[in-house]
Image (cartoon, rainbow, N blue to C red):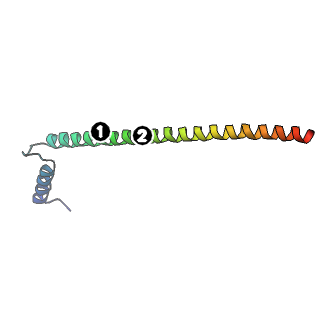
Amino acid sequence: GEWDTKEFTEMRNNLLKELKINYDPINNEAIMEKLKSHEELLKDNNNEVILEQLKSHEKLLKENNEVIFEKLKSYDEKLGKLEELEKLLKEIRAK
């Protein structure tokens, strides 16, 4: 069906109120500008949140990499000791 002018005016006034526009513009430029600024703020806020999350994930990855590196060093040392023991065992068996 067709829109009732009263219904349309009421919706428009609610939108103006929601966007905190205190005057009734003749055209939709004020509404579009306000929506654009809200959209930009939302985009900026989302980008900031994403950047913070990336920094947090990067920090966690770095910490995890350090832990893994330390474990690898420890395993490498243990492997070296096992190889020494194996060499000594072969020498003992050879005698």
**Dot 2 alpha-carbon crowd within 10 angstroms: few under 14, some 14 to 19, many 20 or more:** few
Left or right of 59, for residue 84: right
The spot of residue 64 in percent (x, y) is: 52, 42
| Amino acid under disc 1 | Asp
Q: Nearer the viewer, mark 1 or mark 2?
A: 2
The spot of residue 78 in percent (x, y) is: 69, 41
Q: For marks 1 and 2, give the CA distance.
A: 15 Å
Left or right of 78, for residue 45: left
Residue at the outermost bottom position? 1
Left or right of 18, for residue 49: right
Q: Are marks 1 and 2 in contact (CB under 8 Å)?
A: no
Q: Which residue is mark 1?
A: 44
Residue at the outermost left position? 23
**Dot 1 alpha-carbon crowd within 10 angstroms: few under 14, some 14 to 19, many 20 or more:** few
Classify mark 1: helix, strand or loop: helix
Front residue (pair 81, 62): 81
Q: Residue at x 81, y 40 (%)?
A: 86
Front residue (pair 41, 9): 41
Classify mark 2: helix, strand or loop: helix
Number of marks present in the image shown: 2
Residue 54's label in the rendered image is 2
Q: Residue at x 88, y 40 (%)?
A: 92
Q: Residue at x 21, y 62 (%)?
A: 1
Front residue (pair 3, 47): 47
Q: Against 9, is 55 above or below?
A: above
Q: Residue at x 13, y 49 (%)?
A: 16
| Amino acid under disc 2 | Leu
